[in-house]
Amino acid sequence: MFNINLGNLGGIKLKRKNLIGAELTNADLKEYYFEGANLREANLKGANLEKANLKEANLKWCNLREANCHGADLRESDLKGADLKGANFEEANLEEAVLEEANFEEADLEEANLRYADLEEANLRWANLERVNLLEAHLERADFTGANLKGANLKGAILKEANLRWADLEGANLRWANFEGANLRETHNLSLDQLSEVQTLQGAKLNEELLKALKEDYYTLLVPENYVNEDLLP
């Protein structure tokens, strides 16, 4: 780890710079230009990165706890394994970002753009994801326990074996989402109408009431593709 004194110089350009392990705790980096910079394992705890440009930046395993990334541009950035607990990502752009195993616990991602992002095995427990865009995102084995997903766009997202216990899905768009093996027990505001539009619920854990209704009206969502019930054959 090394210290960098960047001062309060909003808008400074550090494009493609090597800042591996930089010590930037509580730094004021508002509107800084870090496009393509290498910030792997940097300590940015509590830093102000509002509207900063971090496009294509390497932020693997960095510490962004309680950082302010409101409106930041993180398109195609790599935040694998990063600690983002309690950070503010409101209206941030994380399209196509790599967020595997990232810790977003209690983070605020309201209205953030996560289209096509990779959040496999990410921790999103108790995170605020209201009106977030997760179009076709990879969410395999992600933990959404207690998360606020009101009005979220999960169209075409892959949520295989994801945990959504106690998550609030009021008004969420689940069209063509893949919930194979996902835990949907004890979720809040999840309706039959929403589930009727998903791609599959094969092996998913569901509340008894919803499971019963699905078996009656949308049985094919619960079984493997191309499954044939021989009892129904002529």
Image (cartoon, rainbow, N blue to C red):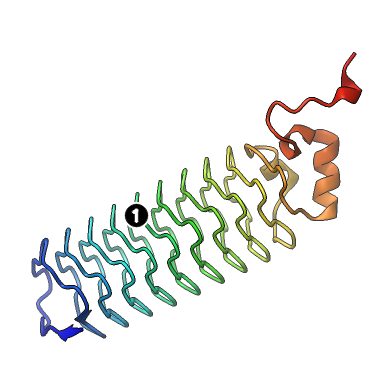
Q: Residues within 10 Å of mark 1 (few under 14, many from 20)?
A: many
Q: Position of residue 96 (x, y in %)?
A: 35, 49
Compared to residue 120, the image places residue 69 above or below, namely below
**Quick one: 225 or 134, which is closer to the camera?**
225
Q: Which quadrant of the structure image shows residue 143?
A: bottom right
x 27%, y 80%: residue: 43
Compared to residue 148, the image places residue 21 above or below, namely below
**Quick one: 21 or 68, which is closer to the camera?**
21
Is disc 1 placed on a helix, strand or loop? loop
Residue behind mark 1: 97
Q: Position of residue 215 (x, y in %)?
A: 83, 39
x 54%, y 53%: residue: 140
Q: Position of residue 139 (x, y in %)?
A: 51, 53
x 10%, y 81%: residue: 6
Q: Which quadrant of the structure image shows residue 20?
A: bottom left
Number of callouts in the render?
Answer: 1
Residue type for callout 1:
Ala
Q: Position of residue 35 (x, y in %)?
A: 17, 59
Quadrant containing the C terminus in the rendered view? top right
